[in-house]
Amino acid sequence: MTTATSIALWPTAAVVLTAAAIDIRTHTIPNRLVVPFFLAGLAVSGIMRGWAGIGQSFLGTLTAAMALGLFCYMGGMGLGDLKLFAAIGAWIGPSQVFMALLLTGMAGAVFALCWAIIGGFLGKTLLGVGSLATGFITKGFKPHETLVLTNPLARRMPYAPAIAVGTLLSFLGMR
């Protein structure tokens, strides 16, 4: 693990675990947690690697925001999740962001499956996934009529726990 990666591990772990706990309890991720974390990521990167470090922080932020921005636009993810992951990008940079995104997606899929099984709505969830997939084919990148966070009847799974697991596991791959 590089020096920069090991320095990023502990603040990132503290913030993602805190965000996960808050998201589970309140279904929100507060800006007062994410904004200072983002600014500290920029500052630490600048102190450690100068302008190149700040550039890598911004690139990590941009990569994360672009990747999750589509899910926000489609109505399947909240802005708090996007801002949390963008702030993580400021700490870990673009190369680790890709790994964290992949691992977060896998963790999110496992969490959603378990959540649906425990909640007794696995069949509806699988039908929803099928509807989303066919919607992409027939309608392109347009939000689904009912499977969006703005629908008061939609089930909302806190996603910060998946972000926490995926991000923390990404540190194992950065040795």
Image: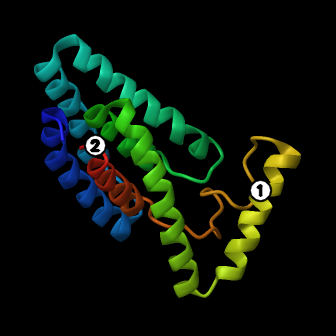
Q: Is residue 12 above or below residue 20?
A: above
Q: Which mark is residue 174?
A: 2
Q: Is residue 105 left or right of residue 39?
A: right
Disc 1 designates what residue? 133
Query: In the displayed image of the protein, which residue is found farthest to the right?
Result: 138
Q: Are marks 1 and 2 in contact (CB under 8 Å)?
A: no
Residue kind at label 2, given as amino acid type: Met
Q: Quadrant of residue 42?
A: top left
Q: Is residue 92 left or right of residue 47?
A: right
Q: Is residue 105 left or right of residue 52?
A: right
Q: Is residue 61 above or below residue 155?
A: above
At 34% from the left and 60% from the top, the residue drawn is: 165
At 45% from the left and 60% from the top, the residue drawn is: 159
Nearer to the camera, 171 or 128: 171
Q: x%, y% of residue 170?
A: 33, 49
At 65% from the left and 57% from the top, the residue drawn is: 148
User: Which SS class for mark 2?
Assistant: loop
Q: x%, y% of residue 76?
A: 60, 54
Q: Is residue 174 left or right of residue 64?
A: left
Q: Quadrant of residue 174?
A: top left
Badge 2: residue crowd in 10 Å (few <14, some 14–19, many ≥20): some
Q: x%, y% of residue 18?
A: 23, 59
For residue 39, say whether it is visible: yes
Q: x%, y% of residue 73?
A: 62, 41
